[in-house]
Image: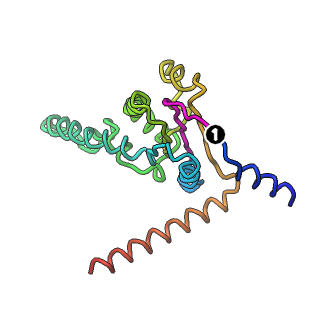
Amino acid sequence: SSNKKTVKHRFDKKINYDIPRDFLIFISGATGVGKSTLARNLLMEIPELVIIEEADLLREAIRSENDRIVKHIVDHFSKIEGINKEALRKLLKYDILKSSTINLEYEDINEQCRLILEPLTGVCFRLMDKGMPAIIEGVNLSFEAMFEDNESFYSTFLDDNNKIFINLYLSDSNEHKNRLRQRSNERREDARKRQTYMK
């Protein structure tokens, strides 16, 4: 109990700090491990931070562009006899970009990360140029794909003390399953409430 008091006392103290203009925190991990909770708690402690949640903006930006490009290519090549449209879409990574990571295999998640790496880097540079310290939160930010054979990204972000990488996980698989089940139930209940409200 004395340890709890010590911790509480430490957090009750007012601490003066300066947040670097190019400060970025990358939070990754599977669905349901606590990424959003950690991001929210960090924001409460450091309100200067901007949160890019689940990399949604990044994915949506390239998904919309990818839809346009893929439609053009598929329409063009489908005129050729024997071309399978679905096989062509998969070849163009269409399905991987559109899929939730819950439905993807490990290597597909890495591929999804590779595909968003360029837009992700662009957003990070814009945040740094504008002096907006931020949390980049995303289930698809696999470190394996972010740093493999990518000297530019590695040297820019990993060798910088103003960049922090956090990967969350749950060692108890049953606890993880329970969290996912609870989240699924909550989302169904929220959807039911919205339908009732709109009637």
Q: Is residue 8 above or below residue 19?
A: below
Front-lying residue, 150 or 80: 150
- The verdict on residue 103 being magenta is no
Q: Would you say 122 lies left or right of 30 here?
A: left
- Which stretch is magenta? 17-30
Q: Quadrant of the C terminus?
A: bottom left
Camera-side residue: 25 or 87? 25
Q: Is residue 169 above or below residue 184?
A: above
Disc 1: which residue: 16
Please tell me whether mark 1 sits on a helix, a strand or a loop.
Answer: loop
Q: Give the residue at the far left of this rendering.
A: 79
Find residue 168 and report its horizontal and vertical position in percent: 62, 46
- In the image, residue 14 lies at what x, y percent? 67, 47
Which quadrant would residue 198 be assigned to in this image? bottom left
Q: Where the N terminus falls, by quadrant? A: bottom right
At label 1, which amino acid type do we have?
Asn
| Image point (56%, 56%), residue name | 32
| Quarter where residue 87 is shown | top left
In this rendered view, identify the residue nearer to me: 48 or 61: 48
Residue 133 vs 46, above or below: the answer is above
How far across and down, in percent of the image, does residue 20 sit? 53, 31
Q: Residue at x 54, y 38 (%)?
A: 25
Residue placed furthest toward the right: 2
Q: Residues within 10 Å of mark 1 (few under 14, many from 20)?
A: few
Q: How many labels sit on residues?
A: 1
Q: Nearer the viewer, residue 42 or 13?
A: 13
- Identity of the residue drawn at 43% across and 44% down: 55
Residue 183 location in percent, x, y? Answer: 52, 65
